[in-house]
Image (cartoon, rainbow, N blue to C red):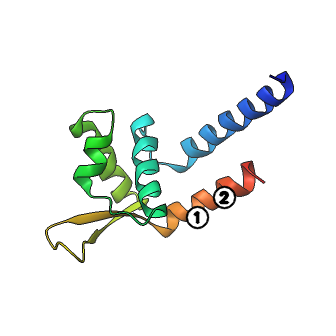
C-alpha cells in the first residue's frame, strides 16, 4: 500500500464528512448516511423504497431510523410519494436538493 495514496484518500473522506456535516441538518448521525444511501441506491436501481423497508434495513432501532427519516423529509432531502401500484404505500425518493448535493460531492472529490 502506498502511504501517499492512503493519506490522499483519507483526506478526501474527511473532507466529504465535513461537507456533509455542513450540508445536512443539525444532529444528523451515521444513521442519516445509512438512510440516504439506501434511498439513493433504491432510486439508482429503480426499486421501490418504502418507509418500512428502509427503516427495518437500518442497523439502528426503528424509532431512531424513523426520527432521522422524518428530519430528512422535513429538511427537503427526501420526499414521500404515493405508490402507483399500492395506494396504501408511500415511497421515499431523493429530492432534487439531494441529487444536487451528490453532484457537488462528485465535482469536488471525485474528478
Q: Quadrant of residue 99?
A: bottom right
**Where does residue 66 sit, x and y in percent of width and height?**
26, 45
Query: Is the residue 92 above or below the residue 23 in the image?
Result: below
Number of numbered markers: 2
Q: Quadrant of residue 30?
A: top left
Residue pushed farthest left?
A: 88
**Where does residue 21 sit, x and y in percent of width and height?**
55, 41
Q: In which quarter of the image is the C terminus?
A: bottom right
Residue drawn at point x = 64 percent, y = 42 percent: 16
Q: Residue 104 carries which label?
A: 2
Describe residue 23's horizontal placement relative to residue 4 as left or right.
Answer: left
Residue pushed farthest bottom?
A: 84
Q: Would you call the spot at circle 1 few (<14 residues within 10 Å), some (14-19), or many (20 or more)? A: few
Query: Is the residue 32 above or below the residue 90 in the image?
Result: above
Residue drawn at point x = 72 percent, y = 38 percent: 12
**Where does residue 93 sit, x and y in percent of width and height?**
38, 64
Residue drawn at point x = 86 percent, y = 26 percent: 4
**Where does residue 101 sit, x and y in percent of width and height?**
58, 58
Foreground: 104 or 87?
87
**Cβ–Cβ below 8 Å for labels 1 and 2?**
yes
Q: What element carries label 2?
A: helix
Query: Is the residue 15 above or below the residue 41 in the image?
Result: above
Describe residue 89's horizontal placement relative to residue 17 as left or right.
Answer: left
Q: Quadrant of the N terminus?
A: top right
Q: Would you call the spot at circle 2 few (<14 residues within 10 Å), some (14-19), or many (20 or more)? A: few
Foreground: 22 or 69?
69
Q: Residue 21 carries which label?
A: none
Q: Distance between the residues labelled 1 and 2?
A: 6 Å
Q: What element carries label 1?
A: helix
Residue drawn at point x = 64 percent, y = 61 percent: 103
Describe residue 17's horizontal placement relative to residue 39 as left or right.
Answer: right
Q: Residue 100 carries which label?
A: 1
Amino acid at each position: 500500500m502506498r502511504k501517499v495514496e492512503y493519506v490522499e484518500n483519507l483526506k478526501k473522506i474527511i473532507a466529504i464528512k465535513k461537507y456533509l456535516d455542513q450540508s445536512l441538518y443539525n444532529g444528523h448521525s451515521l444513521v442519516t448516511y445509512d438512510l440516504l444511501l439506501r434511498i439513493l441506491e433504491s432510486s439508482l436501481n429503480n426499486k421501490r423504497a418504502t418507509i418500512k423497508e428502509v427503516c427495518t434495513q437500518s442497523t439502528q432501532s426503528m424509532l431512531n431510523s424513523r426520527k432521522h427519516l422524518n428530519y430528512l423529509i422535513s429538511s427537503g432531502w427526501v420526499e414521500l410519494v404515493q405508490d402507483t401500484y399500492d395506494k396504501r404505500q408511500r415511497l421515499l425518493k431523493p429530492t432534487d436538493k439531494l441529487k444536487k448535493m451528490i453532484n457537488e460531492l462528485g465535482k469536488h472529490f471525485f474528478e
